[in-house]
Image (spheres, grey):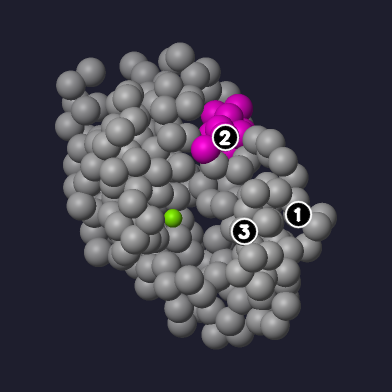
Amino acid sequence: MKRCFIFSDRDGTINKDENYYLGSDPEWRAQVEFLPGVVEGIKTINALLQSFFYILTNQSGVALTGGQLDNLNLERMHEVNKFIISELIRMGAQVDGYYACPYVDSNYATAAAQKGQVVDTQFIVDGHADIKPATGMIEKALAAAQAVKGDSEIFVIGDRANDVQMALNIGGTGILVQSPKTKELGDVEKVQAMSGKVFIASDFLTAANYIKKSFNLK
Ligand SMILES: [Mg+2]
């Protein structure tokens, strides 16, 4: 039987994303709010035979500096991920691990500078394997689980077109869930234009049920 690896984006997919660069505010724990259907959806995924669930997140806020953003360093990035996972586990939703990437590329840095943001140059890396839609974080998770791509079923859930593209880039299925950012940035249309295994869901639970249905068909 194939093993099923389900990867989920974090901000805007698991927890509410209000452009606050989670971890930068000293009271960041109070900003962690799980989106509707997430806990139940992860439990649905956990119940699938041979399934593994990971969170994959690009944390560009680590690369940004100035004011409260200085609080969001690598250590804080890991602290936030561990806190989110411990809260999910406390509610009965199991998470097998997470991978987080603090790097941005020079296009991001240029756009950030135009918005008046300051980027710490040590975090600017073009072509970094862990910047979505590149698949480095998925490959790391598969390698750690001693899984082989062809022998595994791969799904990615996320609120941005880049999350869906990452799934397609590794030969998996991409599932878009819709956050305010998805709509604001026109990502529904971008995903509709993609060719490959994609599904557009209204929320995380719908995404999880889609995976359950697809997996049962195998
Ligand atoms: Mg997101």
Residue type beneath disc 1: Phe
Q: Predominant secondary structure in magenta?
A: helix
Vertical arrangement, residue 41 with respect to residue 89, above or below: above
Task: Write the residue at 48% across / 27% down.
Answer: 169
Q: Which mark is residue 134?
A: 2
Q: Can you see residue 164?
A: yes
Q: Residue furthest front?
A: 114
Position of the C terminus by quadrant: top left
Residue pointed to by mark 1? 123
- Magenta stretch, residue numbers: 133-143
Q: Is residue 191 left or right of residue 130?
A: left
Q: How many marks?
A: 3
Q: CA distance from mark 1 to mark 2?
A: 17 Å
* Disc 1 to disc 3: CB gap under 8 Å: no
The residue carrying pointer 3 sits among few (fewer than 14), some (14 to 19) or many (20 or more) residues within 10 Å by Cα, namely few
* Residue in the image at 46% along x and 82% along y: 30
Point 62% across, 40% down: residue? 130
Residue 139 on the magenta segment: yes
Q: Is residue 141 visible?
A: no
Look at the numbered disc 1 and say if its residue's Cβ is closer than 8 Å to ligand 1.
no
Quadrant of ligand 1 in image: bottom left
Q: Tell me if residue 178 is in the magenta stretch.
A: no
Circle 1: element type: helix
Marks 3, 2: nearer the viewer: 3
- Residue furthest out toward the right: 122
Kind of residue sitting beneath label 3: Ala
Mark 3–mark 2 Cα distance, whole angstroms, equals 20 Å
